[in-house]
Amino acid sequence: MRIERLSRHGRVHTVLSQRGRKHVVAGEPVDNAAVLRRPDDVPVVEEFSGERLAPVRPATLFGMARNTGEENRALPPAAFLKAPATVTDPGADVPLPEGIGRVDAEAELAVVLGAPLRNGSGSEVLEHVLGYTVGIDVTARDAQREDPLWTTAKSRSGFSPLGPWIETEPDPAHARISLLRNGSPVAEGSTGELARGVVEVLEFLSELVELRPGDVVLTGAPGTYAPVAAGDTVTALISGIGELTVGVTSRAAHTRVERNRTGGGQH
């Protein structure tokens, strides 16, 4: 089943697609748990359009560190937090501050929790997963070296694009991930190349804290990263899910556009 989050007339709607049929309900996906379990109880609609939003607005956004290859298998698992406000919608811009240095876009499988999970074990943790979406973990490398907490490297505005929707049925253990810059492929990998897969990641995190519906976990980039700069277009693709495209701008240009939209600035 596909779960989309659209804005129409200023209201958020959840759109469910399965077997060629669409069902629409007002509100956030994580607030419609009963509908997600029984979508056929909601009337079918022929068409429904709106502005595409990030498929979830997480209360907590986790990222996995040291999970980018088999060489990290010998190291203990490690995670970091990204500010939820860094999440941005498909098609949005990622504004880069002037002088920020090297910035990488990392294409990653993002896990969306659908039910509380604490001290999970084995494949049963997957029963608590709502589905999967595409994530781009934007990282300022120079800041990452200077900031041991990685806040200035990963928690800047727009640094966590998610989308285009949530798919509930992909195989998280064997998903192909591709990264394109300005339409050209620059990196490719598979979730099977991660040091720890989704099950182990959720076991680790749920031992630390209760994971809650709507939480998102970025599982790591299996070699699927590349430097980006203002003016670039970045696309991340994951098999069985879809593709997520965002633009990269300078913060100065982004600010000018926002001022023009709101009528601010000097005239």
Image (cartoon, rainbow, N blue to C red):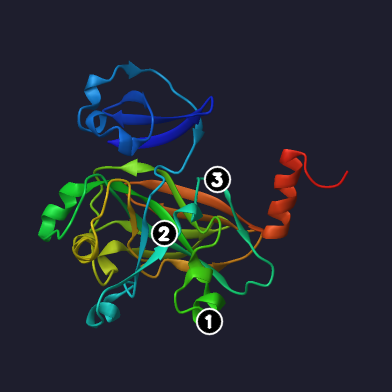
Q: Amino acid at mark 2?
A: Ser
CA separation in Å, label 3 and label 1: 30 Å
| Residue for badge 2 | 178
Give x and y (percent) for residue 167: 31, 42
CA separation in Å, label 1 and label 2: 29 Å
Q: For label 1, count other residues whose C-alpha is less than 10 Å away and answer few (under 14), some (14-19) or many (20+).
A: few
Picture quadrant where residue 48 is located: top left
Q: Is residue 241 left or right of residue 227?
A: left
**At numbered mark 1, what does the secondary structure look like: helix, strand or loop?**
helix
Give x and y (percent) for residue 151: 49, 69
Q: Residue at x 42, y 20 (%)?
A: 47
Q: Amino acid at mark 1?
A: Glu
Picture quadrant where residue 192 is located: bottom left
Q: Residue at x 19, y 65 (%)?
A: 207
Q: Is residue 191 left or right of residue 155?
A: left
Q: Amino acid at mark 3?
A: Gly
> Residue at the right extreme?
267
| Residue for badge 3 | 91
Q: Is residue 169 left or right of residue 104?
A: left
Upstream in sequence: badge 3 or badge 1: 3
Which mark is nearer the camera, 3 or 1?
Answer: 1
Q: Does 181 appear above or below 78?
A: above
Q: Nearer the viewer, residue 128 or 190?
A: 128
Which mark is nearer the camera, 3 or 2?
Answer: 3
| Residue for badge 1 | 146
Q: Nearer the viewer, residue 174 or 127?
A: 127
**At numbered mark 2, what does the secondary structure look like: helix, strand or loop?**
strand
